[in-house]
Image: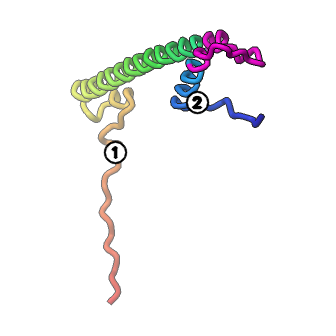
Amino acid sequence: MATVDTSKRLRNSIIQDDIKALQGAKGLPNYTPFRSEARTDLLSDLESKMRFAQEAELQAKAQYQAAQNTAQELEWKFHNAILVLKQSVIAQYGDDGNEVEAIGLQKKSDRKRPQRKAKLAQPA
C-alpha cells in the first residue's frame, strides 16, 4: 500500500463518498469482511466519533473567533483611550512640556525643522 500523508485534511467530498460507501455496505445482507477493521459496526462507531470531533472543532473555532473579536474590540478601545490621554496631556501641559515626553511623544521644540534644499546648478 502506498504511503499516505495523513497530516493533511481530507476533502469534504472524499468524506461524503466514504459515508455513502458505509451506508451502502450496511445494506449488503451477506457482507462478511476478511479484515476486522472493515466491520460495519466498527465503521459506524468511527463515523459517529468523527462527526463528534468535527462538531467539537466547529465549536472551538466559534469560541476562538468570539475571543478574537472580543480581544480586537478591547485593543481598539484601549488604543482610542490612549489617544484621548495623549490629547488631554497636550491640552493640559502644552505641546512643549516635559510631560509630553513622559507619555512617549516628542516635544515640539525637539522636532527637526524642515531644511530648504539647495538648488543644483543646471548645466548649460
Magenta highlight range: 24-46
Q: Which image quadrant is residue 110 in?
A: top left
Count neighbours of disc 1 (C-alpha within 10 A) and say few if under 14, some if 14 to 19, many if 20 or more: few
The residue at the far left in this view is: 91
Dot 2: what SS? loop
Image: 9 above or below 121 = above
Side of 94 where 20 appears, left or right? right
Q: Residue at x 35, y 37 (%)?
A: 106
Question: Is 114 situated above or below 24?
Answer: below
Nearest the viewer among 74 and 121 is 74
Please indicate whether residue 81 sits to the left or right of residue 27 in the image.
Answer: left
Quarter assignment of residue 94 = top left
In the displayed orientation, state which residue is furthest to the front.
Answer: 30
Quadrant assignment, res 68: top left
C-alpha gap between disc 2 and disc 1 = 58 Å
Upstream in sequence: badge 2 or badge 1: 2
Q: Amino acid at mark 1?
A: Arg
Tell me, what colour scheme is on the image?
rainbow
Please rate how many residues cluster around mark 2, counting C-alpha atoms within 10 Å: few if below 14, some from 14 to 19, many from 20. few
Q: Which residue is mark 1?
A: 111
User: Residue 79, position in %: x, y?
Assistant: 34, 25
Q: Is residue 111 above or below residue 27?
A: below
Between circles 2 and 1, the one closer to the viewer is 2
Left or right of 119, for residue 12: right
Residue 52 place in picture, x, y as percent: 54, 11
Q: Which mark is residue 124?
A: none
In the rendered image, residue 34 lying in the magenta stretch gets the answer yes
Residue 71 among those drawn in magenta:
no
Question: Any mark on residue 10, and which?
Answer: 2
- SS for tag 1? loop
